Image: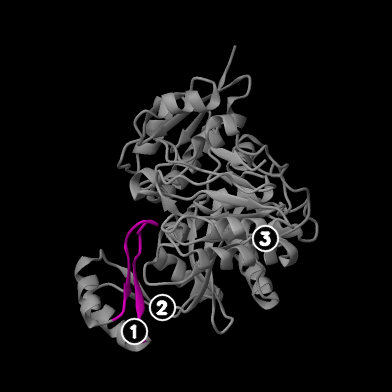
Amino acid sequence: MWMMRVLVLGEFRADRLLPPLLRPGAEAVVLGFAPRLAPFLAASLGADVLCGELPAALGEQDVPRLLAHWRADVAVPNTGCPGQEQFLPLYARAAHQWRIAERRMPVHPEGFAELASDKVALHRTAEERGWPVPRGVVCGAAPAVRAAARELGLPVMVKEARSEFHAGRHYVRDDGELGRACAEVAYPVLVQEALAGEEYGIEFLSDGSPGSFGSPGSCGAMTVAWPVASLGRLDAECAPGRRVRVAPAALPAHVQAELADTVRDMTDAFRPHGPWQMDFAVTDEGRLAVIELNGRLGGVSNMSWAATGADPHLAHARSALAAPAGGLPAGPPPPRRTALELPVLSGTPLPPAPEGTGLILFPGSPANPGPLVGGYSRPVLTVPEGREEAALAWLRGLPPGTLLNSPREAAGQLARGARGLREAGPLVLGSGQAPDPEPEPDPKAGLTREGS
């Protein structure tokens, strides 16, 4: 009996991606960097999963050889772990060759992969197409960086073109920091004005089809947007994962409209195919600014799932198995509760969630290495409408030092999320049905402590 083999390129949250791929008549293989991935997946999923090593460096011809070696029929790029994000353009080029051989790799086309992998390419394209981005200058050497800093005025952000989310960016406040940044970075770099305002994130799933956003004559929307998440206030640390974050978050009406127009132009022009994420800011003057694109799901997906019940990783897997066009469930999944993400040092105990709320722990694992590497985890408190006061009392009752951030910051974000639950309209990108909500994380798997 013929078995379809699905090759997952990357281990990021594979325990959440794999269930639709383990259907009868299909075999899933996961390649990653993490040791002991197979025992973890077997314990999480109750099924043995074949795992292999993903090379730490890939060249132009390595990807086709990898696909041939593992005899894959469908390949699913999953680039959320450190060191794998820059593989995306290679996967895009390999996918074209593979389609000729009647195999499938649902992946962003090369043009979009470049925008998601190269901050210089994104900035230049944004200026050409009129997307709102911070003022910036592309620089190839230290003298140009110093000139750009004088032109823009300190403070500035200095970003390596091909840096990943965990490195390659510098917040520069004075000439001393500017000199150190010039000596440390790999050129070219993008020098941008340092914005003052609030940072946000939003996740999408696109199927690359023309006629997205329900345009006349289309068969329905082909891009799904999860609720906007607040990532807290922009700061010099440039580490939103260490802040208290919350979803859903309401945006000013003019920002919401401009964001939808920008996303529409991105998808019409570059036709992303798969999951992607945008980080953006709303400045203190009320201006929208796109900070970066990522051609993957990331930390925001925990809040996306917790707030809506529709896990973006499961939706990604299902769309990968569907036909190349028209197989994506469309329509924004509506938020059903506030999802408040609370960074704590790894291993810090938390009391049971208050009655009527839930606590999802998201511990470190071979498929979720962030807490193991960074030393902190990001549990999510889920708060239905009407339980905000109980959640606020719980936050205020936490022992001092439990949270990486202040209880006041957590309380402020809880209020923002509650307001978003009442007021935030979906980023409507077309028509169709929302993805079906998924079951909450299984308490028996050690991922969740639900309030009674």
Is residue 154 rendered magenta in the image? yes
Task: Please state if 417 lies on the left or on the right of 18 as rendered.
Answer: right
Cα distance in 3D space between marks 1 and 2: 8 Å
The amino acid type of the residue labelled 2 equals Ala
Report if residue 366 is visible in the image.
yes
- The quadrant in which the C terminus is found is top right
Quarter of the view holding residue 212: bottom right
Q: Give the range drawn in magenta.
A: 153-173
The verdict on residue 414 being magenta is no
How far apart marks 3 and 2 lie (CA) works out to 36 Å
Going by the numbered disc 3, the residue's amino acid type is Glu
Could you tell me which residue is drawn at 65 percent across and 58 percent down?
227
Position of 376 with respect to 354 (left or right) is: left
In the displayed structure image, the side of residue 281 where residue 434 appears, left or right:
right
Q: Badge 3: few (under 14), some or many (20 or more) residues near its Cα, within 10 Å? A: few
Tag of residue 194: 2
Pick whichever of labels 3 and 1 is earlier in the sequence: 1
| Percent of width and height locating residue 241 | 45, 57
For residue 412, the mark is none
Tag 3 residue: 389
Q: Can residue 70 be seen in this view?
A: no
Q: What residue sits 63% from the left and 56% below the top?
A: 391
Dot 1 lies on which element? Answer: loop
